[in-house]
Image: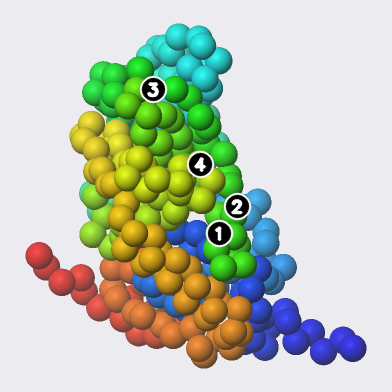
Amino acid sequence: MSTNSNSGMDGSEQLAHVNWSASAAHLFEECPRRFFYRYQQTESTKDYSGYTPSPGVYLGTVVHESLAGQVTRWSRGENIHLQTATDYAKDELERYVEENAETIADRIDDTDEETFDSDSFTRSLVQTARNHIRQFFRVIWPHFENHRYIAHETRQTFDVAEEPVTVQPDLCTRSPEGDFVVTDWKTSAYDRFSNPTIQMQAYALYAYEAYEPELNRIRVQLAHTGSGEFDRMVPTTEDVRQIRDRITNDRAFWTGEGDIESYETNPAVQKCSQCSYLHRCTDGQAVEGEDLEPN
Ligand code: SF4
């Protein structure tokens, strides 16, 4: 009875508990082994209490929270405020640097051997957040002023061919023309490793299943708070077919394969050097010491 066969300690694991989401699918595509490490259910991976997000990741989280706070005001018929939004980000970022100064200093590649100046580091983080929030107020938000609020920042789970799928769009609205619009704020710079199409297709499928049976009345968009630009998509039946297939195939693998060896490594210098599981992965360690290709 106490064989401990599902603990992950023996290299086998059930991954059926992982709902399909664009981020899980992206991780699986990028490196199946990393996906396995991330989602295996061991006691150590469940404990995130000691985890400190990187400054870039934390900045993105804070900008999202700040904008979500303003969208909440708008959903209640209240005015939104640039000052309140930037004050929130400033307070959060100051607290983050103060609490994590040592960890941040260790992570920064300090080749000039200068000591970490937490005041100037905080100022620069706050300035970056302010630029994103300003861009949102000036360039992005005017596109929504005549929209009708539907939902924001809510985690939604629905089934596709009996497989659980999770999405969390930043904002859902109806445009004055009656289109159902799903929007995600993007704070990070363009990432050549990421695949925004599957995320947009997943949002389109959610809108189609939950709100709008006419596909050509659905709009999915990514709003880039750095540049103020939008990536827009009007989904087609082909998009719906592709994302359904993707969900079914990914989930079939995750529920069918429980052996660590089935989740192959996909090492690359840049990817592995930033991977939190490098210490467990010999293939990653083998490439990690190699020099980055100059480009
Ligand atoms: S170190 Fe590299 S190969 Fe290993 S799990 Fe991480 S990304 Fe994959």
SS class of the residue under badge 1? strand
The answer to whether marks 2 and 1 mark residues whose Cβ atoms lie closer than 8 Å is yes
Residue 295 coordinates in the image, percent (x, y): 9, 65
Circle 4 sits on which residue? Answer: 211
Instruction: Give the numbered dot on residue 227.
Output: none
Q: Which mark is residue 165?
A: 1
Assess disc 2: are there few (<14), some (14-19) or many (≥20) residues with their C-alpha within 10 Å of its C-alpha: some
Q: Earlier in the sequence, mark 2 or mark 3?
A: 3
Vertical placement of 281 versus 271: above or below? below
Q: Amino acid at mark 4?
A: Tyr
* Residue 171, image x, y percentages: 45, 34
Instruction: Write the residue at 62% across / 75% down.
Output: 15
Amino acid tagged 2: Thr
Of the numbered discs 3 and 4, the one sitting upstream in the chain is 3
Query: Marks 2 and 3, Cα distance to the nearest angstrom?
Result: 25 Å
SS assignment at label 4 = loop
Disc with the residue nearer the chain's start (3 vs 1): 3
Q: Residue 130: x percent and y percent?
A: 33, 24
Residue 28 drawn at (x, y percent)? 44, 71
The answer to whether residue 135 is above or below residue 4 is: above
Q: Pointer 2: what residue?
A: 157
Q: CA distance from mark 1 to mark 4?
A: 16 Å
